[in-house]
Amino acid sequence: MSGEPEQARRLRSVPQDTASPTADELLSRVARGDEAAFATLYDSVAGRVLGLTRRVLRDPAQAEEVTQEVMVEVWRTAGRFDAGRGSASAWILTMAHRRAVDRVRSEQAHHNRARQVAATESHVPYDEVVEDVTARLEREQVRRCLGRLTPVQKEAVTLAYYGGHTYREVAEKLKAPLPTVKTRMRDGLIRMRDCLGIEMEGRA
Amino acid sequence: MSADIHTLAGAYALNAVDELEGAAFERHLADCEPCRVEVAELRETAARLADETVVEATPPGLRERTLAQVARTPQLRSGVGGASAGRRAGRWRQLTVAAAAAILVAGGASAVTWTVSNDRVSDEQASSAQARQIAAVLDAPDARVFERSLEPGGAATVVVSRNRDRGVVLLRDLPEAGPGRIYELWLIRGSQPRKVGQLAEGVRASTTVIGPVAEAGTFGVSNEPAGGSAAPTQIVGTVELS
C-alpha cells in the first residue's frame, strides 16, 4: 500500500541541522535540570506546538494555554522520555496534540466549543523568529508527502489530525464505514511514513 | 491478537480513538512488539504533520510565562526501570493498585461510587487515561454491578454498562496461579468464550476494562498456561451478567 520511498537512504526520524543541538540532545540536558537547554528547546519547538494547538483548537488564547501546559510538562517529565521509542519532537508534539484534542472533546461534550478564528490575533506582539533552511525543507517534504496520499486517505488523516476528530466522527462526516476509515488512516500514514523515510531502529 | 484491532494503529497514532478503544489498543501493544514499532513510526509520521502548522512568530509573553513557570516547577525523577516495557508495566500496576484500593461498590444496580487516588496517577498520562476509561463505565447511568467469590479464593467485581458497551473487571486476592501459569479473562455468549484480557505471570489482582459486552451473558476467569489459551481450559469462576 505504501508509495515509493522518496529517498533511497532512509533517515531515522526527523533530519536535523548538524550545527545546532538536536531536540533529542536538548531534551536529555533538560532532563538533568538544564533551564538554558529548556529555553533553546522551547525556541525550536514552540512554533509547531502553538501552530498545532491553534489548528486543532481554533482559539489562540486556548492554544497558548495548552502550549504553556505542554512545555511545562516537557520540563517536568523530561526524565521519562525514552529515545528508543521515537524522537523528542514527536514526543512533544504527540503530547500537545493529545492535550488539544482532549480539550476539544471535553468542550464538545459541553456544547460550547469556541469557534474563534485566528484572524483576531494581530494585536498581539510577536517574537521575530528566523526560520532556518532545514525547517523549511522539512515542511516542504511534509507537504509533498501529504500530496502522495490518495484523496480519501488525505481527507481521513487530516480530519483526524488537524480537526481533532475521532475516526468514528470522521466516518460519520464522510458517510463511510468504520473499517474503511480505520484502513484509510493507517494506509495513509504508512504511505507518508515511507515517503518521509521514517524508520525506527528495531523494525524488521 | 486479532488483526481487527491492529487496523486501529493509524487512528491510534492520530489520537483519533476514544478512551476505551485507546486502552484496549494499549493492551494489545503490550503483547505485540512489531505493533509497538509500527505505532512509534506512525506517531513520528503524524507529528510531522505539525510542521505544516508552524507559527513563525510566537508571542513573547508566552515564552516568558512558560520559562517563569518552569523555573518554579520541580522535575519528576526519572523512572527506576530502564526498559520502556518495564516502565509501561509499572504504570499499569500502579493504576491497578490505586483503582483497586479505591473502587467502592455500593449495593444497588445504579449506585456505584468510586474514586481514584489522583496524586498516585495524575502524573502518568497512561494511567489517567485508564482512570478516565474506568470512570466512563462506572459513571454510566445504566452501570450495573455483579460480584462473586471465586472457587480457589479471591473475588471478582464486574461493572457493566450496556449503553457504553464496556465493563470494568476488578479482581482481587486471587491465589497464586501456579508456576508457569496465568489468569485469563473471558466473556461468554451462549457457549462461545471470547478472551478479553489476561494477567501477567504472578499478578493476582487487576482492574481491567473489557468490551464489547453487549451480547455477553457471563464473565469468566480461568487458570491457563503462561502462553495463554485459545479457549478456557480451567475455569476458576464465573459471574452472570444479568
Image: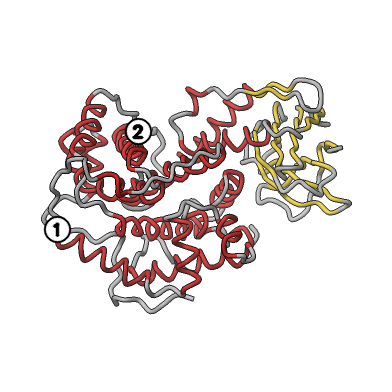
Regarding residue A88, the answer to whether it shows in the image is: no
- The location of residue B174, given as percent across then percent down, is 72, 30
- Chain for disc number 2: B
Rendering quarter of residue B4: bottom right
- Chain for disc number 1: A
Which residue is denoted by mark 2 in the rendering? B78
Q: Nearer the viewer, residue B84 or A33?
A: A33
Secondary structure under badge 2?
A: loop
Within 10 Å of disc 1 (Cα), the crowding (few <14, some 14-19, many 20+) is few
Q: Nearer the viewer, mark 2 or mark 1?
A: 1
Q: Residue at x 44, y 67 (%)?
A: A204
Regarding residue B171, the answer to whether it shows in the image is: yes
The image shows residue B39, relative to residue B95, as above or below, that is below
> In this rendering, would B93 be left or right of A18?
right
Q: Residue at x 29, y 45 (%)?
A: A120
Secondary structure under badge 1?
A: loop
Q: Nearer the viewer, residue A61 or B17?
A: A61
Say if labels 2 and 1 share a chain: no
Quadrant where the image shows the N terminus of chain B: bottom right
> In this rendering, would A55 be left or right of B93?
left
- The location of residue B33, given as percent across then percent down, is 50, 56
- The location of residue B54, given as percent across then percent down, is 27, 54
The image shows residue B221, relative to residue B205, as above or below, that is below
Which disc is residue B54 wearing?
A: none
Q: CA distance from mark 2 to mark 1?
A: 33 Å
Q: Mark 2 is on which residue type?
A: Ser
- The location of residue A73, given as percent across then percent down, is 34, 35
Q: Nearer the viewer, residue A30 or B8?
A: B8
Q: Residue at x 82, y 36 (%)?
A: B237
Which residue is denoted by mark 1 in the rendering? A132
Q: Mark 1 is on which residue type?
A: Asp
